[in-house]
Amino acid sequence: MLNQIKGLHHVTSIAGDAAQNNAFFTDTLGLRRVKKTVNFDAPDVYHLYYGDEVGTPGSVMTYFPFPNAARGRPGTGEVGTTVFSVPEGSLGFWRDRLAAKGAANLAEDAPFGQARLTFDGPDGDGFALVEQPGDTRTPWAGNGVGADEAIRGFHSASMRLRDGGAMGELLGFMGYEKLDTSGDVTRFAVNGDAATVIDVETLPGAAQAQQGAGSVHHIAFAVENREKQLEVRKALLDTGYQVTPVIDRDYFWAIYFRTPGGVLFEVATNEPGFDRDEDRAHLGEALKLPSQHEHLRGFLEDHLQPLEG
Ligand code: ZN
């Protein structure tokens, strides 16, 4: 069993309109945009990163906005709900705020005994806020949401699978322990820093998801550094997973592998971080391009949709 994985690093999803996506995460949810760059593999679209002040691993929601992307169709083989942690007693504030901002499908429940508010993002993305007592992470409180209510980072990600068994085994191999079961959902947690929970919802009869705007593209798990990442990579390869080589994403190093049931996993390093090429006071403001795409700057600055903030 591995012990290098410390929880979620980031969650990456597909959006339609970039400006709407930017407004939702900054104005509505109050996160900070910590990086404005492009998809390294398709540089004509943005890669936008939102999180706490510096984009601490475990707080980072990222998007590829494709302007004309068709809406995804929810189903199995994907992350259905991305869950953020908020302070105890703050759900009333969030219910009012999200209702005032027009968030769709607001509802409340309390799975595993934790008060939770569920809602959709602008492309139908599944989100939830859960009250997590004792979450000591320092929030970003710069976008009109006070520190008493602000999002602390991720609580968990919830996957929908036809057969949760093989995923349970993989999570166990990755260092996760089964905590509890509630209805169709099994909860796992890893001994880590934050964002340590993964839920697996088993839906044997449900149709496979079709990826599009509003779908999660992949989830990334955090390791401290490149050395730990290579240990994880070797262990996964030795177990029979097909894992990519280590890829430089400028703000972290990444490896990817497809999991049983179809969800794409990444393992990302906590180093070097989002302040490697920008001053902390101005994170996310300028268009940052990886060196291989710097020659496209003029074209991209003319063609990418302008964003507020
Ligand atoms: Zn990623």
Image: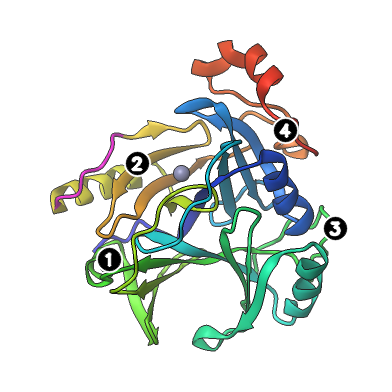
Residue 133 vs residue 202: left or right?
A: right
Q: CA distance from mark 2 to mark 4?
A: 27 Å
Position in image of residue 20 (x %, y %): 71, 46
Which one is earlier in the sequence, the residue at label 2 or at label 4? 2
* Residue at the spot of label 1: 167
Could you say which is closer to the camera, residue 241 or residue 192?
A: 241
Residue range corresponding to the magenta coloring: 240-245
* Residue at the spot of label 4: 279
SS at circle 4: loop
Position in image of residue 146 (x %, y %): 83, 64
Q: Which residue occupies 66% across, 41% down?
A: 17
Q: Which residue occupies 54% across, 48% down?
A: 213
User: CB under 8 Å between callouts 3 and 2?
Assistant: no
Q: Amino acid at mark 1?
A: Met
Asked if disc 2 is less than 8 Å from ligand 1, the answer is no
Image quarter in which the N terminus is found: bottom left
SS at circle 2: strand
Which one is earlier in the sequence, the residue at label 3 or at label 4? 3
Image quarter in which the C terminus is found: top right
